[in-house]
Amino acid sequence: MNFLYPSVELIKYFLNDTGLFTHPDSACVMLNLTGIPCAFCGLSRSLIALINLDVSGALYYNPSSVVFYPLAGFSFASVVALALSGQKIVITNWKIFGTILLVILTLLWLVNIFFGHQTN
């Protein structure tokens, strides 16, 4: 993702002069244009805190990270295990699956809006 960094910096340079970027230290477009963090704001800093076994720091940056990363790791491990065993995941009801994903994403977003810290 390092190839995106120069383009993000260029966008930040032009938008900063117009006053559109409310959080110039963040690359999150939603946070900068609306002032409202997205569901994933702070997850990178939370991951760094979790790697350093700093759970309170992870909770500070994005409270949902302590749920998000274990679930993401479990999901990834499950897909790899099923792929290695030759099995497939078959979703029989996409409407229910999509609704569950939408509810989870909305909950992650609300937790981050009310309890996350997007400033350094």
Image (tube, rainbow, N blue to C red):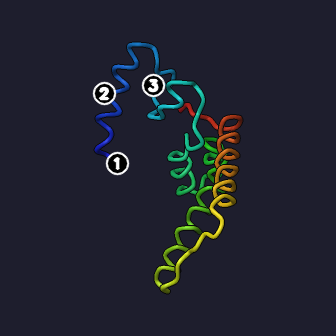
Residue occupying the point 39% across, 20% down: 15
| 14 displayed left or right of 50 | left
Closer to the chain start, of discs 3 and 1, is 1
What element does badge 1 sit on? Answer: loop
Q: Nearer the viewer, residue 117 or 3?
A: 3
What element does badge 3 sit on? Answer: loop
Spatial CA distance of label 2 from label 3 is 12 Å
Dot 2 crowding, Cα within 10 Å, few <14, some 14–19, many 20+ = few
**As displayed, is residue 102 above or below residue 14?**
below
Residue occupying the point 40% across, 18% down: 16
- Say which amino acid is labelled 3: Pro
Q: Can you tell which quarter of the image residue 92 is in?
A: bottom right
What element does badge 2 sit on? Answer: helix
The residue where tag 1 is placed is 1
Residue occupying the point 57% across, 25% down: 35
- Say which amino acid is labelled 1: Met
- Say which amino acid is labelled 2: Leu
Q: Nearer the viewer, residue 52 or 20?
A: 20
Q: Position of residue 38 (x, y in %)?
A: 57, 37
Residues tagged 2 and 1 counted as in contact (Cβ below 8 A): no
**As displayed, is residue 27 above or below residue 51?**
above
The residue where tag 3 is placed is 24
The residue where tag 2 is placed is 10
Q: Position of residue 9 (x, y in %)?
A: 33, 30
Spatial CA distance of label 2 from label 1 is 15 Å
Closer to the chain start, of discs 2 and 3, is 2
Q: Position of residue 26 (x, y in %)?
A: 47, 32
